[in-house]
Image (cartoon, rainbow, N blue to C red):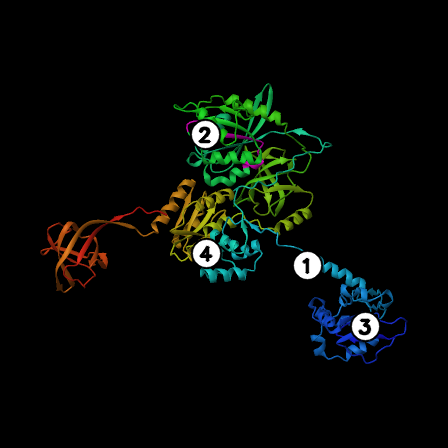
Amino acid sequence: MIHFFFKCQFHYMPVFFYISYTYNDDVMLLTSPKLLDFVQVKVNSSTSSFMNVNNIVSNIINDKSNKPDRKHKSDSHTQYVPEIKKVKNKLSKKNRRNSGNIHEDSIFSNNNDNFFNDKSLVKIPSRSYRLNKAKKKLKNSVSITNQSKQNSNNNQDVINVDNSSTVKKVLINTPLTIQELSYKLNIFPAEIITYLFVKKGFSVTINQVIDVPIAQEIALSYDFILLGNEYDYHPEPRLNNELNNSLVKTARSPIITILGHVDHGKTSLLSSILKTNILNKEYGGITQSILAYEVIYTNHNKNHKLIFLDTPGHKAFQSMRIRSAKVTDIVLLVIAADDGLKPQTVEAIKYINDMNLNCIVVINKIDKPEININYVKEELSKNGIFGEEYGGNTMIVEVSALKGYNIELLLNKICLLSEKLNLVTNKNQSAEGTILEAYLDKKQGSIANIVVQNGTLKIGDIIVSSGNYGKIKSIISSTGCKLKSSGPSSIVRILGFSAMPQAGSLFIVVDSERDAKKYCSDFANSNNDILSDSLKILNTRVTVNTNCNKKQFNLIVKADTQGSLEAIIQLLSSISQNKVQINIVFANFGNISSSDIELASTTSSIIMAFNINNTSQINNLIKKYNIVYKNFNIIYDMLDYIENYMLNLLEVEYNKKLIGRATVQTVFNINKGMVAGCVINEGVLKKISYIKVLRKNSIVYEGSLESLKRLKDDVDEVYAQNECGLMCSYNDWEKFDVIDIYELVALEKTL
């Protein structure tokens, strides 16, 4: 009847092994204990069990997760009783550093739980508390067996998690940096850099941009599934227009957005509604920004206030059309009867279907001859827009904007649909809406064109949008009148933001400046750079054809507003860059500054401006530094200029056309070099010809002629069956060499 009691001292915590196989309570304490390799314990006369003590202790020591925090090493002394401290102080510093920490909850495993009974439990001081040395004593004993069971079960749950069924999917549709790709794939950047160097031979840095095909190839190599870019447009959550029943509801005016392809008569239709000529106010007769207009129309002795948004139809202004579609209540889809559905028409239909917008189709230019309105309606049906005559619920109105035909009918339809929608709001709530456009005025500062969708905006309100806030100082209506407040469904120009808000973002009015700062701090934690992705598409990056020697075209872009800048970047993205790479050094909106001039001079860039008025000082700096500077008011002109500038950077390419053949009869030497005396066998030999010298059907020389003579006279061409002498940079002529004669035809330069 013997009890074994093992007392082992390790780095920080004492560990006690209590092994029993007796039938009474006598205990033998070993004053000089040694760790035994195997201890045999007989439970009864027929069975025996072995416990490898060394293995248990080694596993605990090697458990790195239980090592103490080095900076708290000195504090742990307060956890032990004085008797334990005496033993611990005998250990050397080296042993303390190399020894592992033993936790009370990892001494025994589940397999040994049945080896102990309730009487054999050893109470060990818990390390979960840091007690005051002077005032508190050790407490909160922990049961080793129960803790071991709990931790073993927890570990088992973690280990048994099956991640094999996880499907890794990723969407890569724009160029991105190595760091951004590593975030998407959850892979270390060093692995991606190594992959590109070993597999592709590209030496890249973590901030360098790689092209879409290369990024997709890397994702596939790590077993990712590439998601298709089903939609170019992802609608954001719209404002919550559901009002509490307890709030006072008032009717509001509809916001009507005019969408359609360029030159289909959108602005002409609006001019006919307003009974004024809007086209005279626009450069080139085209719309290049979002313009708002108010109309008071009387229908059935009731005045209706209608808010119209005119949008650009050019493909470069897609972002403006998206912003207008987000805030609208009714869409007027304008289609030219003589032109049918075009790309921007299909784009507008996509917004209507995706955002479930209320729509009235306006077929314009019905006064033109040879039109087929039924064909237009069939095309609409193929794209999911069904008129009432085709069993749908979409109103279709045929008008002539130039002659004013059916304009009254169209306005009646708009009022009818507006009443059907029953648009209501609460004027007393805090204002909220959308930033349509933003720009910087050199005298007043940041100005934003906004649409108030809910509530009432007043002077003095604290407004917050896209990480910026400010106090409203001025409210100006679309007609230029100064207002003290602006109610729902109004489009106004405000002054008050401390910095430029982001076009297309939502705004809200908050109660205090403290709330505004909190909102801005939350916004600052997210990445909301509207131009970063677009610039990556344009700027120099690692591509499949990285080794090709492309021409570089450095460019600085300045525009009057955010929307214009977005349109210009979108326009530049549509230009082919197979031969010339556009590298946008800097892009921003606002007036040109002296720093822009210095940057252009340093980087050898040209400056492209859109609707910018320079001061005389800036113009003098442009002349001083000899900067190539162009300012445009029409976006088409800017596109043509940039394309022509890029074409001028390319070398002329020629197509070789065989026009004759000659044979060398003799070779003689003159002071300038070797001359080949030839006979023209067929065709003609011209002085500006390109020749190939063949010897035994192998090409020994290719190049251009330098001199052509017949007898002693210089001639421009020699025809068949005549003799001549020619000279070029080749001097190793031999008799009977064959000369193929080509005419170089200059090819049209293409990007």
Which residue position holds label 3? 41
* Sequence-first tag of 1 and 4: 1
Cα distance between the residues tagged 1 and 2: 67 Å
Label 3, residues with CA under 10 Å away: few <14, some 14-19, many ≥20: some
Is disc 1 in contact with disc 3, using a CB cutoff of under 8 Å?
no
Residue for badge 1: 159
Nearer to me, 258 or 228 = 228
Query: Which of the pair 708/483 is nearer the observer?
Result: 708
Marks 3 and 4, how far apart at CA: 70 Å
Q: Nearer the viewer, mark 1 or mark 3?
A: 3
Tell which circle, 3 or 4, labels the residue nearer the N-terminal end: 3
Q: Quadrant of the N terminus?
A: bottom right
Instruction: Indicate the secondary structure of the residue bearing disc 4.
Output: loop
Residue type highlighted by circle 2: Gly
Q: CA distance from mark 1 to mark 4?
A: 41 Å
Q: Is residue 294 left or right of residue 374?
A: right
Circle 1 or circle 4, nearest the eye: 1
Question: In terms of image quadrants, where is residue 143?
Answer: bottom right
Q: Is residue 172 visible?
A: yes
Considering only order in the chain, which callout, 2 or 4, is on the residue closer to the N terminus?
A: 2
Q: Residues within 10 Å of mark 4 (few under 14, many from 20)?
A: many
**Magenta-highlighted residues:** 324-338
Foreground disc of the pair 1, 2: 1
Q: Which mark is residue 265?
A: 2
Residue 410, percent across and down?
52, 23
Per the image, the residue denoted by label 4 is 542
Q: Position of residue 692 (x, y in %)?
A: 22, 56
Height in image: 144 above or below 656?
below
